[in-house]
């Protein structure tokens, strides 16, 4: 097998630059060490993290006795109070909540896809569609 992978990849990227944004993203995601789905998951976590920082800029925090005594789960099976939580415990909580938020967004997206699918086919529910037609992109 002759040739150089780096040269091929350069040519492939030049070719892909003429394609749609989605095609380019899929091509680049294909090189993720853990696969396409891991690349998508990381991108979604990044987007959710950006949103969290955006919300943080507008969020006020008052440290009160009530807050200090309030418990939260860290995501690894234990609970801690706000008053005693370490940076690592807050980071664990943020990571858990960010993953949950991505999951909620993915679920909302599926419902939006179903709405579009039903409208496209003039149906009132998925059960009315033949399975081969029940696909949305």
Image (cartoon, rainbow, N blue to C red):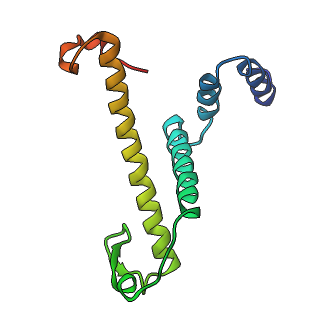
Q: Residue furthest bottom?
A: 65
- Quarter assignment of residue 68: bottom left
- Quarter assignment of residue 120: top left
Front residue of 69/85: it is 69
Question: Image height check: is 106 above or below 89?
Answer: above
Is 20 left, or right, of 121 in this rendering? right
Quadrant that contains the N terminus: top right
Question: Image height check: is 96 above or below 27?
Answer: below
Residue plotted at (21% across, 21% down):
125
- Quarter assignment of residue 108: top left
Residue plotted at (32% across, 24% down):
115
Instruction: Give residue 12's position: percent from left, percent from top.
Output: 73, 22
Instruction: Give residue 64's position: percent from left, percent from top.
Output: 42, 86
Residue plotted at (74% across, 25% down):
13
Instruction: Give residue 34's position: percent from left, percent from top.
Output: 53, 42
Is 109 left, or right, of 4 in this rendering? left
Question: Image height check: is 131 above or below 87?
Answer: above
Question: Image height check: is 132 above or below 57?
Answer: above
Instruction: Give residue 6's position: percent from left, percent from top.
Output: 79, 30
Quadrant that contains the C terminus: top left
Front residue of 50/59: it is 59
């Amino acid at each position: 097998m002759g040739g150089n992978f780096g040269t091929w990849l350069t040519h492939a990227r030049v070719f892909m630059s003429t394609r749609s944004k989605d095609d380019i993203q899929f091509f680049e995601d294909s090189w993720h060490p853990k696969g396409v789905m891991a690349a998508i998951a990381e991108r979604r976590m990044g987007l959710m993290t950006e949103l969290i920082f955006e919300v943080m800029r507008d969020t006020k925090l008052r440290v009160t006795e009530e807050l200090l005594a309030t418990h939260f789960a860290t995501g690894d099976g234990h609970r801690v109070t706000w008053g005693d939580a370490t940076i690592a415990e807050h980071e664990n909580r943020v990571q858990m909540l960010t993953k949950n938020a991505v999951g909620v967004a993915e679920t909302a997206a599926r419902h939006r896809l179903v709405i579009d699918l039903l409208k496209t086919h003039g149906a009132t529910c998925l059960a009315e569609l033949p399975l081969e037609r029940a696909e949305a992109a």
